[in-house]
Image: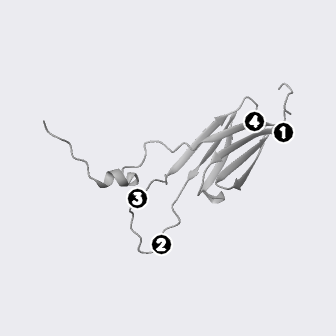
């Protein structure tokens, strides 16, 4: 019986493979608040210039990339566990978002996307 041998470094450096077939899906918490919605994305290491936020129908779509900016001259990879790639995450809400206003905040590795709707909480659309 022939055995398949994988390079040993593949166990320690998962980032050295081909790029993912689809973007990374960062986790998100969704909250209904008095003036709309609060979407909290776990995006440590992502800055304001690294993302875009779009409203598409009833969906809020966050796209961007996390890039390793902490490299020092002369360093060599020993182990990679953090995902450095493009990401995309869409969240659908039951409100009409055609006239919604969107604001982003960055706090402790979280990106807070506030979506202000025209329909106050508890009132029908």
Residue at x-position 64% and y-position 46% = 41
Please name the residue that numbered disc 2 is placed on. Answer: 72
Query: Do callouts 1 and 3 mark residues in contact (Cβ within 8 Å)?
Result: no
Circle 1 or circle 4, nearest the eye: 1
Cα distance in 3D space between marks 1 and 2: 44 Å
Q: Is residue 57 visible?
A: no
Which residue lies under the disc numbered 3?
79
Q: Residue at 45% of width from left, 75% of height from top?
A: 73
Distance, label 4 to label 3, CA atoms, is: 43 Å
Left or right of 113, for residue 21: left
Residue designated by label 1: 35
Q: Nearer the viewer, mark 1 or mark 2?
A: 2
On the rendered structure, is 45 left or right of 17? Answer: right
Examine the rendering and report whether any part of residue 97 can be seen: yes
Report x, y in % for residue 18.
Answer: 37, 49
* C-alpha distance separating marks 4 and 2: 44 Å
Between marks 1 and 3 in the image, the one whose residue lies nearer the viewer: 3
Q: Earlier in the sequence, mark 3 or mark 2?
A: 2
Which dot marks residue 97?
4
């Amino acid at each position: 019986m022939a055995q398949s041998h994988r390079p040993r470094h593949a166990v320690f450096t998962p980032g050295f493979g081909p790029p993912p077939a689809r973007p990374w899906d960062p986790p998100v918490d969704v909250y209904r608040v008095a003036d709309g919605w609060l979407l909290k994305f776990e995006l440590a290491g992502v800055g304001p210039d690294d993302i875009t936020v779009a409203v598409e129908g009833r969906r809020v779509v966050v796209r961007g990339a996390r890039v390793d900016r902490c490299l020092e001259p002369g360093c060599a990879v020993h182990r990679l566990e953090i995902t450095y790639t493009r990401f995309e995450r869409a969240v659908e809400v039951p409100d009409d978002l055609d006239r919604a206003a969107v604001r982003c905040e960055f706090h402790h590795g979280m990106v807070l996307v506030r979506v202000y709707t025209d329909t106050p909480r508890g009132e029908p659309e």
